Amino acid sequence: MKSLVLVLLVAAACAKHEDYIGWKTYFVGPSTTDQFKDLAVMVPVFELDFLSRPIIGREGLVLVKPEHQDSFTKALEEKGITYYIHADNIKERLDIDDEAIEAQNKLTMSRSGFRKPFDNYQPLEVYDNYLEDIARRFPNIATLVTPANSFEGHPIKYLKISTTDFQDRRKPVIVIDGGIHSREWISPPTVAYAIRKLTEDLTETEMLHNYDWILLPIVNPDGYKFSFERARFWRKTRSTDHAQGQNCPGVDGNRNYDFFWNTVGSSSWPCHDTFAGSRPFSEVETRVVRDILHEHLERITLYITMHSFGSLILYSWGHNGSFSHNAFALHVVGVNMADAIFNATLPHFPRYTVGNAGLSPVLLASGAAEDYAHYIGVPLSYTFELPGVFTSGTGFGGFTIHPRYIEQVCKETWAAIAVGARRSAEMFGKK
Ligand SMILES: *[C@@H]1O[C@H](CO)[C@@H](O)[C@H](O)[C@H]1NC(C)=O
Ligand SMILES: *[C@@H]1O[C@H](CO)[C@@H](O)[C@H](O)[C@H]1NC(C)=O
Ligand SMILES: [Zn+2]
């Protein structure tokens, strides 16, 4: 009986990722403004799915369906854009990733017997349990809030962390979210790690005492679960209340905010990965973040939304690449945060680049969270593209940074968050 169960389990594991048989990922390196423009034109034509965006001097990584590969590479050659294959057998790479995650599970389980979000790529339940556990153990500073359920009915949970129960109106509020794009698995751990650094592993007490925190590790629990169980590259929510909802569920949460909604870099076609939704804030998941931002707007000095990958700190305006009135402060604090990461990172991690979204004209996009927050009045608002590292001869890499690096990414990102909080308070806090 036991061996039958085992056989079935192995069969299930092998059946996984079969949808990606024949898909390929390519590194693409446009090097002139014209080439960036040419590449931008190709995005809808070949249904290009950028896992990381190219910038001058650094290639992007793009996922391409079998039916578009020949015409896509031909178009690249015509335009003189350099490219090379990253993975021509994606399923195999993803299977290796699964093994690495399984091995990491054994390692971390034996260490503590209790799974934590930053130990490994963890299922949704581990996050729910962690937030509940922290709220229980630190009742004087941590409050668990469940403002709504996701489309499929999973509670969307965040922690408010404060030594003064959010009553001291002079304190800056720092808001950090993750997991709006479900497949970017390295994002939620960094938010959970910030929770850890303010509670069970408090080493910088002023971080706890001087600020009020709102930490929301997984904005999009439905997509997160789906990316674990069904489709590794699932990016959107799982809502079906739009035209084509039954064939093509889901909305790109980071195109769904009410900021120049559905004007650039997003799609009106529900089957596309960048579908903007049937209207602004059609998704309960984005409404949760919107409501947090408005509730505390007067005091929010810093908002960060965690994505991957590319080692980038990006700021507004993401829909047209122009600088905002606050661009100088945005850039300076962005560089401060990147410096803090550089000081804490590993030598073979790529160095962060700081800039406005015009850095990568291929992926200008409307309806993004960071732009919306800045537009309604958050002075310092950023999208982080967390690092991806390619370990040769192993798994998918980049997008699924090896689980052994999760804690490293969390640590260096926390260093950036701490510096960002301090600088934002100096510049925009009420004294
Ligand atoms: C880009 O959008 C911002 C925000 O709406 C606006 O102030 C700016 O003028 C726009 N830039 C261009 C070149 O249209
Ligand atoms: C650099 O990192 C060290 C060790 O983690 C830390 O003590 C120091 O404060 C950091 N310096 C800066 C400028 O961030
Ligand atoms: Zn993303």
Image (tube, rainbow, N blue to C red):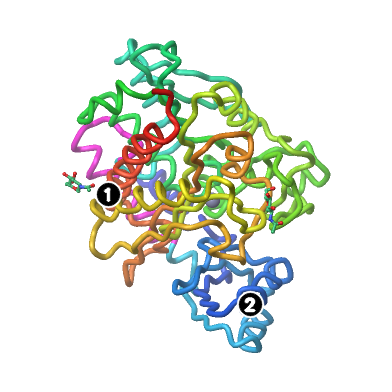
Q: With 112 as the anchor, is 82 left or right in this view?
A: right
Q: For mark 2, what is the residue?
A: 69
Relative vertical location of residue 294 with respect to residue 316 in this rendering, above or below: above
Q: How far apart are marks 2 and 1 (CA)?
A: 35 Å
Of residues 169 and 427, the one nearer the viewer is: 427
Residue plotted at (42% across, 63% down):
396
Q: Is residue 318 magenta?
A: no
Q: For mark 1, what is the residue?
A: 408
Give the residues in magenta: 94-118
Residue 71 in picture, x, y percent from top left: 69, 81
Circle 2: is it few (<14), some (14-19), or many (20+) Cα within 10 Å? Answer: some
Of residues 111 and 81, the one nearer the viewer is: 81
Of residues 15 and 355, the one nearer the viewer is: 355
Relative vertical location of residue 256 with respect to residue 429 in this rendering, above or below: below
Amino acid type, residue under disc 1 in the picture = Gln
Sequence order check, earlier mark of 2 and 1: 2
Circle 1: is it few (<14), some (14-19), or many (20+) Cα within 10 Å? Answer: some
Amino acid type, residue under disc 2 in the picture = Gln
The secondary structure that dominates the magenta segment is: helix
Residue 121 in picture, x, y percent from top left: 38, 44
